[in-house]
Amino acid sequence: MIEEFLVLGLIQGFIYALLAMGFSLVYGVGGVLNLSHGGFYLLTAYVFFWNYTSLGVVNTIIISLIMITIIGGLAYLFLIKPLEHTPIGVVIGTFALAFFIEQFVQFAGDAKIHSDIPPLIEGSIEFLGFEIDAHLLLIIIVSLTVIVSLTIFINKSKLGKSIRAVSQDREAATLMGINADRILLYTVMISAFLAGIAAILYIPKDIVAPHKGWSILINSFAVVVLGGMGSLLGSVAGSFIIAFVGSYCNFYIDPSVSYLVPIIIIVVMLIFRPQGLFGKKELL
Amino acid sequence: MFKEVRKKVESFPGYLKSWVGTFKGGLTIFCLIILLIIPLLTQNAYYLGEFFTLAMIYAIFAASWDLLAGIAGQVSFGHAIFFAISGYISSAFIVYFGFHWIIALFIGSIIAVVFGLLIAVPCLRLKGPYLALGTMSFGLILFLLFTMGGLSEILGGSGGISKVPPISLNPVIEYIITLFIMVIVFIIIIAIAKSNFGTILKSIRDDERGSDASGINTTKYKIFAFMISGFFAGIAGALFAMHYRGVNPAFFQPLYSFYAIVIAALGGIATIRGSALGAFFFVIVTRIFENIEFFADVEPLFFFSIILIFTIRFAERGIITPAIEQLKDLWDLVLGK
């Protein structure tokens, strides 16, 4: 029992971390809560699901990731940027995109729930005397790599510094010669890319279904609200807290209660501590 | 004071006459006359019920959302809460306690108002997308609570309440009564939007800090907006439950909240009338999709989601309102202005 609890918590923790980091970045840099974040996940999941048998796993991964990054960029250019001055516009615009993606995958595919996606790597590996599922190991390694690379990238690289500059003070950054719009474009594309990776890693352990987009969005929001908007550290911390609490509820209380966990966290945090655990708008 | 009231009442016919003379007034009267004629053209329960009565119910629902989001600026993604709670309460009062449907409808709507208060208070400091996701979360909590049966024993749980009698077994009477309710609700909501109260809500929407600084108690007005909006959404919910002869947890789905948003956005956010136009457009197009061979596979919502994206991107005032305005220009042209 405790193994399953730990394993699920670990998997979900990493997946949520990938999702929340992208979500939080977009908010920190552009002040935009991208309601279509779940849609990015969903679209990648479905594209992978439809094509992995015919095109091969590796090819499909590459194609879906490129696709979702481009779509993220297009979403920014077509929907987010033109509407950024009307708050209602951004909310409904990103929502409409999420809604569209949910309808699109049903139109292009079907409305059923699919839970039979095979793991990316089969089999298990011996490690320190434990049998670890190979896919789980893949999730851990890939996620850690991504998280660490992203953190280094944000801190050290020139683009990363521009991102941090725009998130701290957009006007000042523009005065310094940074093209804030372009930076936001890149940020949205990065967040879409992260959502895509999360989708590909998670769906063998989870389901592919149209309504999944909303639960991913709610989960990302819960993590970011808990960890603090704009804080990457908060996103990672928040993801694991929520993942393990959820996993605990799943195995020791009742599986249906685990659905309530992120939602209750949102409500409680928004009432009592809206800035989250690691607060405010600075990255890291 | 008596003289003033008398003057107002006496000037009313004149006011009405000049209103009908304007394009918008004339068009509204025209639409109302058409709606009144429809039952003479068909008494078919499917056409009356699923095309028009349903559209009127959705119109009320969307208008209540438009009041909250378009006028007061509180973009709620959990409007289904009011809709469903009122559906449940009014159904319970009719089925379990034997109340007359009008009373049950009021009780349901009043309970929805209470929920409006309960939701407004935590959401006071939330803006924009935070408010959207916060209200969506509330909606999901209630949806999960009702589906998973913590409330199974009360109010029918996951099976819901069934065998709720409709307003009338005769679809024509149901239609007329719904039409009557819709007209009254719209008159009230439009009056609210145009009143001082409405202007205050708009100022909160446009610049909350400024309104606060001007001495307006934004908290009070925001809470009122939620409560009033909840009341009308509750009316819609009760009507919906009676129309479909039952209520179940599916009423709490985010999908119904989305309906309100899509319909109001198509008709034009902050134009209350647009919700009516949007509702009819939405329902009739959905039915057309269902009945034409060519579109058999296409889910109407897919179509609407595309329209919504383009509407919100290019036409924040909806697609219907500018279309009507083009008509108005044409009308002026024809009249030789």
Image (spheres, coloured by chain):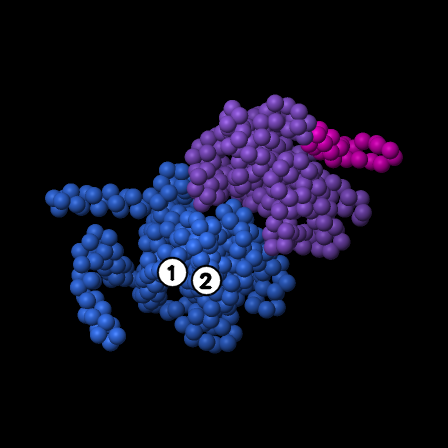
Chain colours: A purple, B blue
Q: Which quadrant of the view contains residue A55? A: top right
Find the residue positioned furthest to the right: A129
Query: Which amino acid type is marked by label 2?
Result: Phe
Image spot of residue B32 (x, y percent): 26, 59
- Mark nearest the camera among 2 and 1 is 1
- Residue carrying label 2: B224
Boundaries of the magenta span = A120-148
Q: Which quadrant of the view contains residue B18? A: bottom left
Q: Earlier in the sequence, mark 2 or mark 1?
A: 1
Image spot of residue B17 (x, y percent): 17, 61
Q: Secondary structure at mark 1?
A: helix
- Residue A128, magenta (yes or no): yes
Could you tell whether A76 is left or right of A13 in the image?
left
- Residue carrying label 1: B197
Query: Which amino acid type is marked by label 1?
Result: Phe
- Residue A51 visible (yes or no): no
Total number of numbered discs in the rendering: 2
Mark 2 neighbour density, 10 Å: few (under 14) some (14–19) many (20 or more): many
